[in-house]
Image (spheres, grey):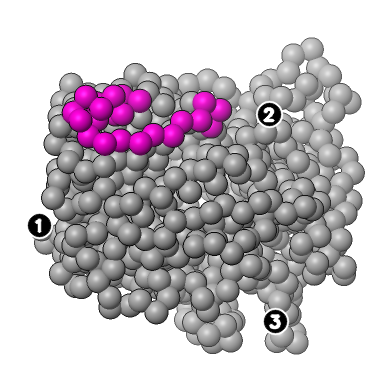
């Protein structure tokens, strides 16, 4: 497949690397695509293509790799969730991001188009002018709602099931059957709980509703058939756990849940609707299920992918054909993580992704009859896995005995040396985690000569509810101590030169960087914060979290009382920081408004702390624009070089398409 041709057509230009101390362009170049799915008949692929400030979707003909249709959304809009409804029509869910580090927020808009690019129409969403596509259906009043597809109704080539969310605070949601040709909708179920998502069985009957009100208490309801009364089967307020339905057995006699536990990772259970009996099926000793594995050509759950110290798959029945298929693929790909991302409807042509900490991802078509895999495309073809920095899982005990995990990225050939190190706490912080997959920032920093330490401090996702909850109201407390303990562990193990360690992060990671420098002034040589939050009480008055219906409840539960958070705000602790600081922020950031960074800079200046800053008025939560990204990372590497001694970078120039 001639991937450079279709990416250039969509993105209108890729970045070409130039020889330099650190080839910055090698790391800032966007993936050729994000996700790719094969059509039900195997004739086409649909792929999301990242551009500077948006994500497009391209349809490629399998025989020659030629683009036959494409959809390019407006700026800061992204084609994210997409599914083939039938052999020639794709349904695309749109999302908005106000910055490159922002989590995509589905807007509830659904756009459909044919494989050849024809009949591209917005079917549902706030920008629809009628209740159907285009202007062919024009009622007196248009209902403005958000819609999210959850069942493609494999036996129905015309309709899908969507959850409908009215634009009201904490709404009662419903299920509509959506005609992807005409855009007409018909309501078939209503939820008994606010903000509900739904799960259907293998015949398209809506059987579960899972939601929560403004109190954020989760409830799961079940019904035996359409029109039946909903019955409560799990209430978080009663048993202090959250359960979510993930599908049904082939004969619909059993349902499958992910179920949180009091201690340890989540478990997958089967549930018998007739008896109410729950039977544990899968539980990893370390981590939660990351992705559900489904039988090719169906929506039937058969196992799960776990992302722990290394990726691994587990199955409900380890002797099943599904398990044997995965084991053969894993053996063939030599230890890389494996996941079947999509398949033809008959299950004979599988799209298989293989990836590792050194490899962003390769995709193959596997023919189940011929037992043969053919390379299709690489997510980042310019990355050579044999020369990428090595990513190794690490584990240690925090000061209170809690087991904490993370990953250490080390420049090629530098293992065991006392290297200058960058401690890189992730953003979020709650529910987010580092999984050891290929990550551009650690790879870039390793190319500059640094060991990079990523820590899944308490509060992180992937390690069960108790681990995540242990971070509640611990901003600047135990969460920060975990990062400190990880740094000291790396020193004790000989991975880091204790005189050359910097702490750097984005969003919450920016908070942790400045808080680490304030609490441990002798541990770090410098600190850098990118689109960070530094004034915790301001999170209750500025930003996009508190503006949501359940946002204030969330902030109080997870941050604490705003009257008491000033003592844990770096903006009030600037005098305790004794090392140089680098700050960067965007003027359109809704998650971490630029005022956080400007107040932090002013406080550092007042305290006499050396501080450098970089502001872009038109950027949001993470920088989109290529020249801004180049300047940011050039300045960041120069800052780190001055204080740790690593390499600097010279940005290259964009190649002509």
Query: What residue does disc 3 label?
Result: 373
Q: Position of residue 503 (x, y in %)?
A: 28, 50
SS assignment at label 1: loop
Give the distance between the C-alpha atoms of the residues marked 1 and 3, in whole angstroms.
49 Å
The quarter of the displayed image where residue 306 is located: bottom left
Residue ranking furthest to the left: 400
Residue at 87 percent across and 68 percent down: it is: 64
Q: Nearer the viewer, residue 37 or 334?
A: 334
User: In the image, is residue 550 above or below residue 10?
Assistant: above
Number of residues whose C-alpha sits closer than 10 Å to that of mark 1, classed few (under 14), some (14–19) or many (20 or more): few
User: In the image, is residue 332 above or below residue 512?
Assistant: below
Mark in the foreground, 1 or 2: 1
**Image quarter (top left, top right, bottom left or bottom right) of the N terminus:** bottom right
SS assignment at label 2: loop
Query: What residue does disc 2 label?
Result: 125
Give the distance between the C-alpha atoms of the residues marked 1 and 2, in whole angstroms.
49 Å
Q: Position of residue 221 (x, y in %)?
A: 45, 42
Q: What is the tally of numbered marks visible in this picture?
A: 3
Q: Position of residue 369 (x, y in %)?
A: 75, 84
Q: Horizontally, is 656 left or right of 419 in the view?
A: right
The quarter of the displayed image where residue 350 is located: bottom right
Q: Earlier in the sequence, mark 1 or mark 3?
A: 3
User: In the image, is residue 62 above or below residue 541?
Assistant: below
Number of residues whose C-alpha sits closer than 10 Å to that of mark 3, classed few (under 14), some (14–19) or many (20 or more): some
Q: Position of residue 511 (x, y in %)?
A: 29, 39
Residue at 75 percent across and 67 percent down: it is: 344
Q: Nearer the viewer, residue 490 or 18?
A: 18
SS assignment at label 3: strand
Q: Which mark is residue 400?
A: 1
Q: Nearer the viewer, residue 544 or 312?
A: 544
Give the distance between the C-alpha atoms of the residues marked 2 and 3, in whole angstroms.
40 Å
Disc 1 to disc 2: CB gap under 8 Å: no
């Amino acid at each position: 497949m001639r991937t450079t041709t279709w990416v250039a057509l969509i993105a209108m230009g890729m970045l070409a690397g130039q020889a330099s101390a650190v080839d910055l362009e090698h790391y800032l170049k966007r993936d050729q695509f994000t996700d790719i799915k094969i059509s039900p008949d195997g004739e086409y692929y649909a792929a999301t293509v990242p551009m500077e400030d948006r994500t497009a979707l391209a349809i490629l003909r399998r025989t020659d790799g030629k683009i036959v249709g494409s959809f390019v959304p407006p700026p800061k809009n992204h084609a994210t969730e997409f599914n083939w409804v039938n052999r020639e029509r794709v349904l695309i869910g749109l999302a908005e991001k106000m910055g490159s580090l922002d989590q995509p927020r589905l807007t509830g808009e659904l756009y459909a188009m044919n494989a050849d690019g024809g009949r591209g129409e917005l079917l549902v969403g706030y920008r629809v002018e009628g209740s159907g596509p285009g202007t062919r259906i024009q009622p007196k009043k248009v209902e403005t709602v958000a819609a999210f597809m959850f069942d493609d109704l494999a036996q129905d080539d015309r309709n899908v099931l969507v959850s409908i969310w009215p634009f009201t605070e904490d709404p009662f949601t419903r299920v509509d059957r959506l005609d992807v040709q005409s855009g007409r909708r018909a309501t078939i179920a209503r939820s008994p709980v606010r903000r509900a998502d739904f799960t259907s069985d293998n015949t398209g009957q809506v059987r579960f509703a899972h939601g929560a009100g403004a109190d954020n208490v989760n409830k799961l309801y079940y019904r035996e058939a359409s029109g039946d009364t909903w019955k409560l089967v799990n209430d978080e307020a009663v048993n202090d756990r959250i359960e979510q339905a993930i599908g049904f057995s082939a004969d619909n006699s059993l349902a499958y849940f992910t179920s949180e536990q009091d201690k340890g990772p989540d478990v997958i259970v089967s549930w018998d609707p007739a008896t109410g009996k729950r039977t544990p099926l899968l539980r990893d000793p370390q981590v939660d299920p990351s992705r559900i594995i489904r039988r090719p050509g169906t929506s039937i759950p058969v196992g799960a992918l776990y992302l722990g110290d290394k990726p691994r798959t587990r199955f409900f029945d380890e002797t099943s054909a599904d398990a044997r298929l995965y084991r053969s693929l894993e053996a063939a790909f030599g230890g890389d993580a494996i996941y079947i991302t999509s398949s033809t409807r008959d299950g004979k042509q599988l799209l298989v992704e293989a990836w590792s900490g050194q490899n962003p991802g390769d995709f193959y078509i596997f023919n189940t009859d011929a037992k043969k895999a053919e390379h299709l495309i690489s997510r980042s073809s310019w990355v050579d896995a044999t020369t990428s920095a090595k990513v190794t899982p690490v584990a240690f005990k925090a000061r209170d005995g809690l087991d904490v995990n993370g990953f250490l990225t080390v420049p090629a050939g530098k293992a065991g040396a006392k290297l200058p190190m960058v401690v890189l706490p992730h953003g979020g912080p709650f529910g987010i985690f580092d999984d050891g997959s290929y990550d551009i920032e650690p790879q870039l920093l390793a190319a500059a000569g640094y060991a990079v330490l990523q820590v899944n401090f308490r509060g992180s996702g992937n390690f069960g509810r108790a681990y995540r909850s242990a971070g509640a109201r611990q901003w600047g407390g135990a969460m920060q101590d975990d990062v400190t303990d990880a740094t000291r562990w790396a020193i004790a193990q000989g991975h880091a030169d204790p005189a050359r360690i910097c702490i750097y992060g984005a969003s919450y990671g920016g908070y942790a960087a400045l808080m680490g420098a304030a609490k441990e002034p002798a541990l770090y040589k410098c600190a850098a914060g990118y689109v960070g939050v530094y004034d915790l009480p301001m999170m209750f008055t500025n930003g996009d979290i508190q503006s949501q219906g359940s946002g204030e409840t969330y902030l109080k539960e997870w941050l604490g009382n705003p009257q008491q958070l000033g003592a844990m705000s770096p903006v009030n602790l600037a005098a305790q920081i004794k090392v140089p600081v680098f700050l960067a922020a965007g003027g359109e950031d809704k998650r971490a408004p630029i005022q956080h960074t400007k107040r932090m800079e002013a406080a550092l200046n007042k305290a006499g702390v050396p501080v450098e800053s970089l502001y872009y008025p038109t950027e949001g939560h993470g920088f989109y624009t290529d020249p801004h990204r180049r300047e940011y990372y050039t300045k960041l590497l120069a800052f780190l070089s001055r204080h740790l001694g690593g390499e600097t970078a010279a940005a290259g120039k964009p190649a002509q398409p």
